[in-house]
Image: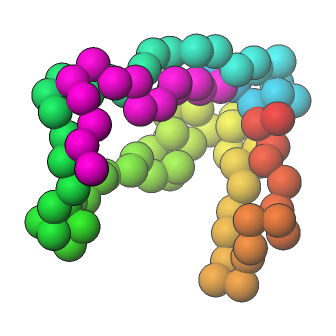
Amino acid sequence: MTIPEGTILYHIFAWTAPGALGGFEVYIGDLVTDSIMTTSAWGDEHMYIRHARADDDIALKPEWGPYYPYYTPTDTPSSFNNPFE
C-alpha cells in the first residue's frame, strides 16, 4: 500500500485554553505527505513520534493545571472526561 504525495493525513485542531476558562477549539493546520509513503518493517518497528508532556504546558500556563486530565494505569478512555471540552 502506498500513500501519494500531497495526501492530507490529519486536520489538526488545538484548544486556546480550557473550555471552563473561555477557551475554544481552533483549526491550526494539516499534516500532509511531502513524498510518496509506503509501508515498511522499519516504520512498524522503529518509527517514533515525540509527544509534548502536559507538564511543559502547565509550566507555561499554571492556571490550566486544574483542568488537565490526569491518568492512572487503570484508566480507560471512557473513564475520564476531557476538561478542555
Q: Residue furthest front?
A: 1
Q: Which residues are magenta?
A: 1-15
**What residue is rendered at 51% in x and 26% in y?**
12
Q: Nearer the viewer, residue 50 or 47?
A: 47
* Residue 57, horizontal then vertical, whole percent: 51, 39
Q: Is residue 46 visible?
A: no
Most frequent secondary structure within the magenta stretch: strand
Q: Nearer the viewer, residue 30 or 26?
A: 30
Labels in figure, total: 0
Q: Quadrant of the C terminus?
A: top right
Q: Residue furthest bottom?
A: 74
Dividing the picture into quadrants, the one containing residue 79 is bottom right
**What residue is rendered at 76% in x and 36% in y?**
84
Is 58 left, or right, of 82 in this rendering? left
* Residue 77, horizontal then vertical, whole percent: 74, 65
Whether residue 9 is in magenta: the answer is: yes
In the rendered image, the vertical position of residue 14 relative to residue 58, given as above or below: above
* Residue 42, horizontal then vertical, whole percent: 12, 66
